[in-house]
Amino acid sequence: MNAAVPLEGSRCLVTGGAGTIGSTVVDQLIAAGAREVVVLDNFVRGRTANLARARELAAPGQLRVVDGDIRDRALLRDLLGTGTDLLFHLAAIRITQCAAEPRLALEVMVDGAFDVVEAAAETGVRKVVASSTASVYGLADDFPTPETQHPYNNDTLYGAAKVFNEGLLRSFHAMHGLDYVALRYFNVYGPRMDVHGRYTEVFIRWMERIAAGRPPLIFGDGAQTMDFVHTEDIARANLLAAAAPVTDRVYNIASGSEVSLRGLADALLTAMGSDLDVEHGPARDTAGGVVRRLADVSAAERDLGWKPELGLEEGLRQLVGWWREQSRDQDQGHEQGQGRG
């Protein structure tokens, strides 16, 4: 069976479509000629501003944005209807929030995911492209880490939920013939990252410190490594997974190279044109005890024709430019608010 679904002329539903990655997927789907792209987002993490580019690109009737929740089963079935070709499932809560609010994690990451997959099978969706994570590995045994690495080193609730998601998709493929591909993202970065709220990224905290003339703070020696992949590359992997003649597979999506936390801080300082040094604080436990990330991405290149295009230097330059623009807009809004007072 050929599980390839052409993007041009397709009808797509993107859960979490106003988020960091989801909105970038939406941009690329619009540009690829999808007939209709429906965004489902509850706007807890997602932002209306993230869809500004898609609105500019979209023809009349090509983009529909729905403020709703994946746990609303009736809404899911209504949005999917009977003619949805592709479902991109990106709605999730962050790993840190999963630890802080485990009951919510269960409701969104497990029950919500089940609702999405069940609705996809019942309404005849041709293919699901689902977001998974390197967290399923915990601290891997082998580097570069292949997709065959077992999930038993993971000790995070977020990673456990994503392992369930992958198993859920595989079981629905076996029971109902639902085609899917799951993508295991490694360390994600890029424009539209979470700037607001309690669970911001380390990048955001560092940029705020550097802009204020304070050095980026690293807890410990900064020797732990990560494998960073840009949101544009991740979105492109989603589209290629949809269009590829593969199903019932998972793929690592990463750069295939590692950088230490100290090296990352130095690279960000360079991108911001700062001559500050790095400040070190007392070591903290890393999430799940993971001190190294390095992916084997050869399977995605072989099967999907995907490989990363944006290197860390250029990616950080884009991130810094976007963040500075966001900061200017926020400052201007604050000044205007004061003026009205």
Image: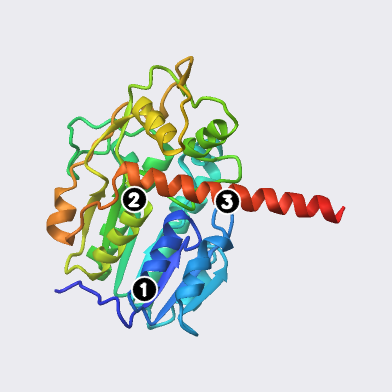
Q: Residue furthest right?
A: 341
Residue 265: % across, % down: 41, 30
Question: Residue drawn 38% across and 22% down?
Answer: 222
- Which disc number belongs to residue 132? 2
Name the quarter where the N terminus is drawn.
bottom left
Residue 268: % across, % down: 42, 35
Compared to residue 281, the image places residue 322 above or below, namely below
Helix, strand or loop at disc 2? strand
Viewer-side residue, 267 vs 260: 267
Amino acid found under the numbered disc labelled 2: Ser
Left or right placement of residue 13 versus residue 310 in this view: right
- Which disc number belongs to residue 31? 1
- The answer to whether residue 73 shows anywhere in this view is yes
Viewer-side residue, 340 vs 289: 340
Amino acid found under the numbered disc labelled 3: Gln
Compared to residue 148, the image places residue 75 above or below, namely below
Instruction: Return the disc, 2 or 3, that comes first in the chain's sequence.
Output: 2
